Amino acid sequence: MIKGLPKELLDKNLITTDQFNKIDPIVSGKIISVFYELRALLYLGVMLLATGLGILIYQNIGELGHLLSIVALTLIMIACFWYVIQKGLPYSNDKVKAPTPYFDYILLLGCLLTIAIQGYLQFQYQILDDNLGLSTLLSALLFFVMAYRFDHVGILSLGITALASFWSLSISPQKWYSSDFFSMESNLQITAIVFSSVLAGIAMGLDVKSIKKHFTFTYINFSSLIYFVGATAGLFMGDYYYSYLLLIYVGCVLSFFFAKQKRSFLFLLYVFVFGYIATTYLLSDLFFDREPELWFLYSFVSCGGFIFFIIRYRNYFTRKP
Amino acid sequence: MKIAYNEIGVYNLSVLKETKRWFKHGLISAEQSESIKAAYQTSLFNPNLMIRILLFVASALGLAGVTGILVLLSMDSSENIIPWLCIFYGLGSLFFLELVFIKGNHHYKSGVNEALLYHSLGFFLGGILALEINEHFIAVIGFIVFSIAAIRYLDLICTLCAIASLCGFIFFELNEAGGWFQALIPFAFILIFIPIYFFAKRARGKQALRLWYDNLLAVEAVSLLLVYAGGNYFVVRELSVEMMNLYLEEGQDIPFAIVFYILTAVTPIAYLYSGIKKKDKVLIRVSLLLLALSAFTFKYYFSLGHPEISLTIAGAVLLLITLWLLNYLKVMRNGYTRENIMSEKWGDANVEAFVISQTLGGNQMPDRIETGGGGQFGGGGSSESF
């Protein structure tokens, strides 16, 4: 925020007096929006409540207080969904604006509580005995339905992660550094590549049909992460590494076109990072094993060249409004 | 001191960024946006965040290669000369940054700038450290070097490093003095950073210092945090035990314990109150974060043994308060509104969705019975939401 800016632009006749009267109180801090603060608090409240209740129902199982907590939980859940259905706007293929500022968070709380109750029922009455996979699938289904019906991209991302975890894929960047992301025997990297390709295909199909176009980014983001990490894991296993190399390059080309189409630099970042890793792996296999000094030269030349490339074509990489 | 970049260019760039937000919120028309662009031209190369990260990583890797080659070349030189080589190399790469990237190619916070700057500062300070000078001067030199870098290159990380050096200096000197001075360290922090806070706040409002707005904002927020940390019971107690070898018997407490209890409880509330009173967003945001930290501090030492009940109650209370506030602010009151009148640059639905998926445990479904679904609570919340 630049305090004197509205005045300066008014003096230069770049904005009108009406606009000045509207903008200046905001920039000078006479009007303060607590939009983000309140949203953060809502989010934190939902998170704490859902976590606390989730733990609570697994304790003291069989006692009276426990039964009460289940009933209370169910009542809150019903209240959440009742509110959402009452207030919710009709379905549309386009973006739907939430009717109230807290609508999104009440929906989120309702969904999380449903998952908690479902997990509890399963645990208590062994309904889906030994079949945790099915319950994960049910959660994913609930998330997807709610995300599409009430237009909630956060719940969509929960749905995608739940669906991925049904296939034993974990999507959390924190875990990539730990070694057990993909184990050697289970061939999870193949699952990852197939899963992400199918997901991305469906997402692009929906995008072409203009069904919830604003969901595409989240879909493609998750699929490209799973795809690239899976293919890179396959690459580092060593066997058949040429095929994984090829897969990474194909992914790079597709991501590049997506980045271009949607004007998103995040996907360009993926292209360069994973493309570089793959190429480096190839070169190290071909040349560097014999001459370790080449590493220094390589990192200098490749990165220097890369920087030069970006600067040379800088106009291409500048976002157009 | 003059900044390394073209001042008008930097100012124009910030004008363009600001008016872009106005345009996005429909406050000005597309034609006006275009004519502002024509009036405020800038030749600076300032790529967006993703490209910036990419350039930073690439530069860091490339520089690592250069360093490797130089290490191979200078293997045979004698030990005494290596610190000086480091210092000269650091200075040399700084000149390279200035001449080639800033003057030559008009880079401004491009990722390459940062990588080269930290690289050269690292070598320069590393070389000085290796000279084994008087240890009292190390933090002082760090403070001076980082301050100059922060002012000249408008760099936020250097700003934070400068503050960290200052903290290191205060802590080291008082700790060395020993005895009662050690017990005064927390109060020294409070007494030194309160004036720094007010200084930064005043300076941020000055027209002449508008180029350093973000740096002063960082100083302001960090000073508030440090004043709180100086009075926080957890911080004082754990640091006393860890760093100053304070030995506490069962039932014993740190010196002035009651003062720290009071400060832990009162500081966030005081921040929040004056933040709301003065319409100061920095104070409001910092106070919200600190309220959570204070709650954690008291919980840590006076636990009732039922984390799930505390979580549930805290969540319910927080939700109710926020819902009430949202309804209360339906109409604007004293200039406060619940509506989003000007987007923050990081406020984006896709980012929020990713945070939700990472913190609300979509990943944990298969083993939720073992973990109770609570595994990710601690790390997730406060840092990402605020």
Image (tube, coloured by chain):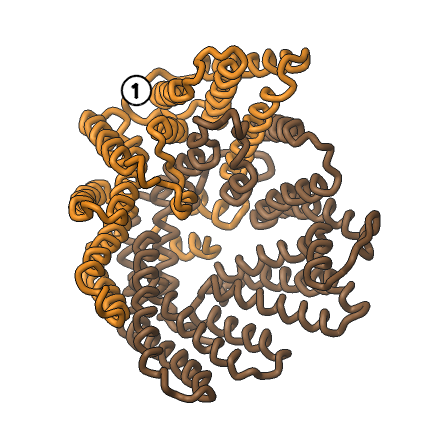
Chain colours: A orange, B brown
x, y (%) of residue B371?
A: 53, 30
Residue B332 in sight in this render: yes
Q: Is residue B3 left or right of residue A300?
A: right
Q: Disc 1 marks which amino acid? A: Ser
Q: Is residue A192 left or right of residue A205?
A: right
Residue at 34 percent across and 65 percent down: it is B60
Q: Is residue A319 left or right of residue B17?
A: left
Residue at 59 percent across and 14 percent down: it is A70
In front: B97, or B249?
A: B249
The residue pinned by badge 1 equals: A92
Residue at 32 percent across and 64 percent down: it is B61
Q: Is residue A170 left or right of residue B200?
A: left
Residue A165's image quarter?
A: top left
Residue at 71 percent across and 32 percent down: it is B305
Residue A46's image quarter?
A: top right
x, y (%) of residue A162?
A: 38, 27
